[in-house]
Each structure stands twice: as structure tokens, then as C-alpha cells.
Image: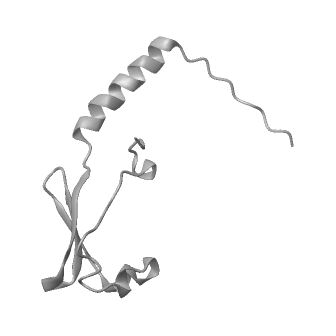
Amino acid sequence: MAKTKACVDVTDAEIGAAIARGKVFEQYAPRAVKAAYREKDDVIAITLSTGIEIAIPRKPLHEISIGLATAAMLDHIDFEESPAAGSPRR
């Protein structure tokens, strides 16, 4: 069965309005502002711009190699915004 292609007409004004809404949302969207290994409870702690902290146990993260890392190896954690999380890559 042949699929029908959809066509949507979008005006410049609608695109501009969507961009403006995105900029407003971006101001309030939680973002990771700090990530650190906390040796005392063996977790990767991620602090969001909202002040909420997410702590992930290190050991179960073996699938991405963090579970095998030592405290010294986790002394500095880098992170970047991800398009998958709804943030544009800059």
C-alpha cells in the first residue's frame, strides 16, 4: 500500500513564534550544572540548575565503563548538553 506524503504549510510568523516559545522554555528547563563523584557513598552526583541533585550508584554503570572507574579516575567529570534531552547543541 502506498503511503501518502503529508504537506504542512508553516508561515514565517509561526516559525518565529515557536522559536520565541522555545527561548522562554529554555530559561526554565532544568540543566546539569555540576557533576561529581562522591566517594563517601560511591555515587555520581549530578546537580541541576533547579537545585535538585540526582545521585546514581557507580557500580551499576559498568555498561558505560564508569562502574569500573576508580575514585581518582572520577576526580573530574565533563558533561555536555544533549539534543536527546531537548537542548540544542551549541
Residue 84 against residue 38 in the figure, above or below: above
Query: Residue 20, how many percent across, how many down?
Result: 34, 23
Residue 80 against residue 25 in the figure, above or below: below
Quadrant the N terminus occupies:
top right
Q: Is residue 31 left or right of residue 17?
A: left
Which of the two residues, 12 or 81, is positioned nearer the viewer here?
Answer: 81
Query: Residue 88, how many percent across, how many down?
Result: 41, 41
Q: Is residue 19 left or right of residue 78?
A: right
**Which residue is located at x 29 percent, y 35 percent?**
25
The number of numbered badges drawn on the structure is: 0
Query: Residue 69, how many percent across, how many down?
Result: 33, 84
Quadrant the C terminus occupies:
top left
- Image-quadrant location for residue 4: top right
**Which residue is located at x 53 percent, y 13 percent?**
11
**Which residue is located at x 25 percent, y 70 percent?**
76
**Which residue is located at x 26 percent, y 43 percent?**
29
Colour setup of the view: one colour
- Image-quadrant location for residue 74: bottom left
